[in-house]
Image (cartoon, rainbow, N blue to C red):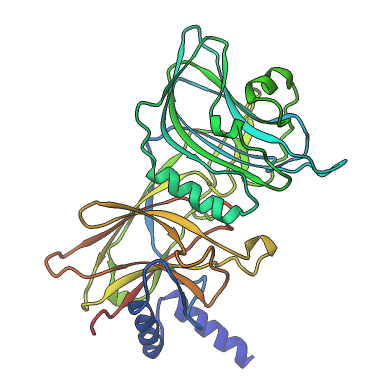
Amino acid sequence: MIKNIFSVALTSLLLNGVYAQTDLKKVSSILKNAKEGEVVLLDNFLDPNFKKIEYKQTIAPGPQFIISDDPEYIRLPEAIAMQEEVLPGAVRLYVYNVNGINEPQQMPRKINAVIKNLGKENLHLRMLKYSSQKPSTNYFQIGKQGLADYFASEEKGNVRVVKPGEVIAIDEAFDKHIVKYDELVHGLYEFVVDQPAQISVLQFAPEKTAVQAFSQIDTVIPFSHVNAGRGIFPVSNYKIVSKDTLLTTNGVSQLVVADGIDDPWITGTIGADKQDAKNAGNYGVLYDTNIKWKSTDGKGLALITWNSRSADNQWCGGMGLTMELFDNDNNKSVVQFPSDRLVTKAAPEAILLKIYKPDPTKDIQEINFTYSPPGASCLPTPLILVPIDLKK
C-alpha cells in the first residue's frame, strides 16, 4: 500500500511538471554540455506523463495526399497495391512498400508508381519535391533520409508531358532498382498535375518497366486496414500553435501530436468505391509548429525527444526522425536525429534536438519547426521542452 501511495504521489508530481531541484540541476547540466543532435543519458527522468502543451490545431493548405502502405508487404508477384484518382492540382504521394514474396520462394521484384492521364488534353506533371531512396532493409535509415531529402528538395523545371490515356512512371529511378525480398521501397513526392489522373503503385517482374507491367496487371490487392493504411486524404498539412506562452519557471512540458487520441488519424477513402480509410500514424503529414515561450528566470529551453514506445513490442525497439528547424531569422536547417547513430533505443536515452537561449531584448520568443511522423518508427514522438540553466 505504501508503495502504491508513493507511486500515485510521484505520478502526480510528474503530471504537474514538478521535479526535485537536484534532478533538474543534473538534467540541466547534461543537456547544457551535450551536442545538439546527439543521444544523451537522462537517468530516472524520462516519463510519458510530462505535462502536455495545449495547442490549437488547424488544417493548413496542402495537396491531395495519397499513401501506399496497405499492404506494406506485397505478397503477390505481380499486383497493384494502391490505386487512386486525383483531381487537377497539387498531389503528395508517399510510397512505403516492401517486397514480401517468400512463397514458393523469395524472388527479386520491382516496385514503382505510375500515373495515367484521364483527361482529354495533355497532362503536365511538374515535380515540386522529390525524395527517392535505393531499396534497403535498413528501414530506419530510409525513413530518416527520405524525409531529409524531401525537406531539402526544391525541384525546378522538372516538367513531364503525358498524353491523354498515356501512362508513365512517376519515379524513373525505381524502374532501374531491383528490390530483393524484405527490402523497402520508399518514395515521397509532391507534384502538380493539370488534368485528372489515376495513380497506381505496383509490384512486378524485374525484366519489365512499370509501364509495361501496368498494361498487363489487372489485380488490385484487397485492402486489410492494417499498417498505416492506404488511400487518398483531403488533409496533408497541419498548423500547430501553442495556446499559452510557456514559462521556464513552470517546469517540463511536452508537445504530443500524431498519437491517434488527442490528435486523431486523418481519414479519407480507398479506391473507386470510396470505402473509409485512415492513416494510422499520420505518416507523411506535415506539422508546421509554433510554440511561444518566455524566460522568467534567465533559463533557456532544451528540446528533446525519446522512444517512449520501446517496451511495447519488437517493432518499437528504435526511433529516428528528421525535422525542419528554423532559427530566429527564419533560416531553415534540415537535421536527422540522432546525428551520432542510427536510432535511439529506450530510456534513459534521449535525443537533444536543439537548445533555445533566452533573448533579453524580447519579451516573448518563438520556437518554430516542421515535424512529420517518422517512417519505420512507433508513435507518438513526444517533443519535450526542458528548462535549463545556461550559465557557466
In the depicted view, which residue is nearer to us: 114 or 275? 114
Left or right: 115 with respect to 243?
right
- Can the viewer see residue 374 in this picture? no
In this picture, is 209 found above or below 345? above
Q: Position of residue 159 (x, y in %)?
A: 41, 22
Name the outermost residue toward the left: 361
Residue 341 percent coordinates (x, y): 51, 66
User: Which quadrant is home to the C terminus?
Assistant: bottom left
Residue 50: image quadrant is: bottom left
In the depicted structure, whether residue 167 falls above or below residue 302: above
Q: Residue at x 43, y 70 (%)?
A: 38
Q: Is residue 62 left or right of residue 298?
A: right
Along the line of sight, the residue nearer the viewer: 133 or 176: 176
Left or right, 189 with reference to 7 = left
Give the farthest residue toward the right: 104
Side (left or right) of 318 relative to 125: right
- Considering every residue shown, the one lying at the far top of the view is 120
- Specify the quadrant that holds the N terminus: bottom right
Residue 71 lies in what quarter of the image?
A: top right
Residue name at image x 20 percent, y 54 percent: 329
- Count of marks, rendered view: 0
Q: Residue at x 51, y 83 (%)?
A: 44
